[in-house]
Amino acid sequence: MPLRLRPSWPVLRSSMRCCETNSNCGREPSAATWRLECAVDLRSVLASVRALWWVVALLTLLGTVSGGAVSALITPLYTSHMQFFVSIAGAASTTDVFQGSQFAQQRVASYAELLAGRELAGRVVDRLDLTGSAETVQAAVEAEPLPDTVLIEVLVTDRSPEGARDLAAALATEFVDLVQELERSGGDEESSVRVALSDAPEVPEEPSEPDWIRNMGIGMGAGLLAGVALTVARRALDRSVKDPDEAAELGGAPVIGTIMRDGHLDRFHVVDRSQANRATEDYRQLRANLQFLSVDEPPKVIMVSSGLPSEGKTTTAINLALTLADAGKQVIIVEADLRKPKVTRYLGMVAGVGLTNILAGSATLADVAQSFGDKGVRVVAAGPLPPNPGELLASSQMSSLLDKLRNDNDFVLVDAPPLLPVADAIGLAPFVDGVLLSVRYGVTHKEQLGLAAQALERVGAKRLGVILNMVPSTADLASAYAYGHGYSAEVPTRRGRRRR
């Protein structure tokens, strides 16, 4: 099976699959295809947010608080409002009234510019004897003509409410005088244009700036967007294995087991099979899947390994053996990690003699095999650690030992060293019937799983399946197993009712 490293985005993966099977891949995608890709991409974003919802919530809260902090630091400003009405005097008929109205509307836009001009600002400075410049007054004035009317809306801002009102009143007086001066023509004493203050300025009661609600809303929105962007970016840049389909493709074998994270298992490495729990059911499902992998030639000698240490291979080998024994199978565990053996330590057994003694010819299988429990599980410890573990595991003595164990047991589980740091497991792999690859959810990198699968492929080892270990209950994958161990037989109550 060729090994391919896929991009992490579901849309791109879908497109790649499409290109592999569809000769029309180069054509413009249909509307239905775009909708499907958008839906897949949206699901990816939602999954990212669900996985790191606390990051989104934290950044949203920080953004809201930051908006409030900025508002607290801003100097309060007060805005006084006023409105001008522009009309034409001397209209004698309806036609004159209409033309005057049109003329006034044309003048309104010019007057709005005049209100925010430097000339008027300078007059206001002189009138109020201000210490600031005309540019300061200009910056405080905002004038806007109301569409399709002869009204001009004016806002005047200052640091004090009385200052805003006084500045607006001075501006109104000077503006009316300035219009009269500009509109006089031909020496007429009065112009035909009339500008009246239709809404006089008042002292504002509340500050117009800062706008706490607006600023905190902007901060909240910015924090929310930042949180979503961060979670999506983290998912896009995450190179760890989390998707079962991706794990199957990278490992070159189907995912035959998904082991949820369990506190008891993390501490003791052996599931409590006396009680109903999710980890126990997960190993039972793994047992069932393993027994039906190849009906015609069922594997008996199975190597359990991983790409790197601490990915759950030893715990998987131990609990799979115990679960197989619960089903009446004769099982033996071979502790073949001759560098850092852990099987006997996890099971609380003697580690003095074992596999290396058998391979060196100083002991027999009967001398070193230890029984664990009363279910038919035996263990061959690693024995004294040798200086050349790779040569011992790849030797003809190891091959002969595995052949003998194959004939005497239903299953032989070999806890092998990790594949990438050392070559020990690569020399051992051709002697077994198949290999189970343990992958730690969210920790094992895609490149590491791909390289481990390639190493097995180079020596012709059969990859039986991939096992996803330590899947957190918060992962999307865990929801598929939520039915789990809570399903039990109905128990009749005293009143004859049934409960689950």
Image (cartoon, rainbow, N blue to C red):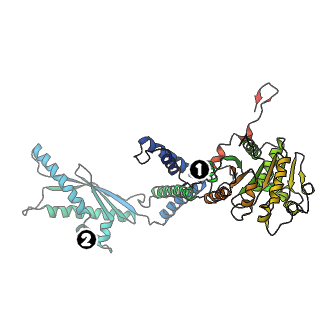
Residue 141 picture location, percent across and down: 31, 63
- Residue type at mark 2? Gly
Q: Quadrant of the C terminus?
A: top right
Q: Quadrant of residue 184?
A: bottom left
Mark 1 / mark 2, whichever is N-terminal: 1
For label 2, the residue is 122
Residue situated furthest bottom in the rendering: 131
Residue at 83% x, 43% y: name it.
329
Residue at 37% x, 64% y: name it.
162
> Would you say residue 339 is visible in this rendering?
no
Foreground of the two, 42 or 296: 296
Foreground of the two, 359 or 38: 359
Foreground of the two, 111 or 369: 369
State whether residue 12 is above or below residue 489. below
* Label 1 secondary element: helix
Q: Residues within 10 Å of mark 1 (few under 14, many from 20)?
A: some
Q: Is residue 116 left or right of residue 269?
A: left
Q: Which mark is residue 80?
A: none
Residue situated furthest top in the rendering: 496
Q: Residues within 10 Å of mark 2 (few under 14, many from 20)?
A: some
Task: State which mark lies toward you, 1 or 2.
Answer: 1
Residue 120 picture location, percent across and down: 24, 67
Residue 172 picture location, percent across and down: 26, 61
> Would you say residue 113 is visible in this rendering?
yes
- Residue type at mark 1? Arg
Residue at 63% x, 54% y: name it.
241
Circles 1 and 2, Cβ within 8 Å, touching? The answer is: no
Residue 91 picture location, percent across and down: 11, 48
State whether residue 241 is above or below residue 138. above
Work out how far the residue at label 1 is from the one at label 2, CA to CA, in angstroms.
59 Å
For label 1, the residue is 50
* Label 2 secondary element: helix
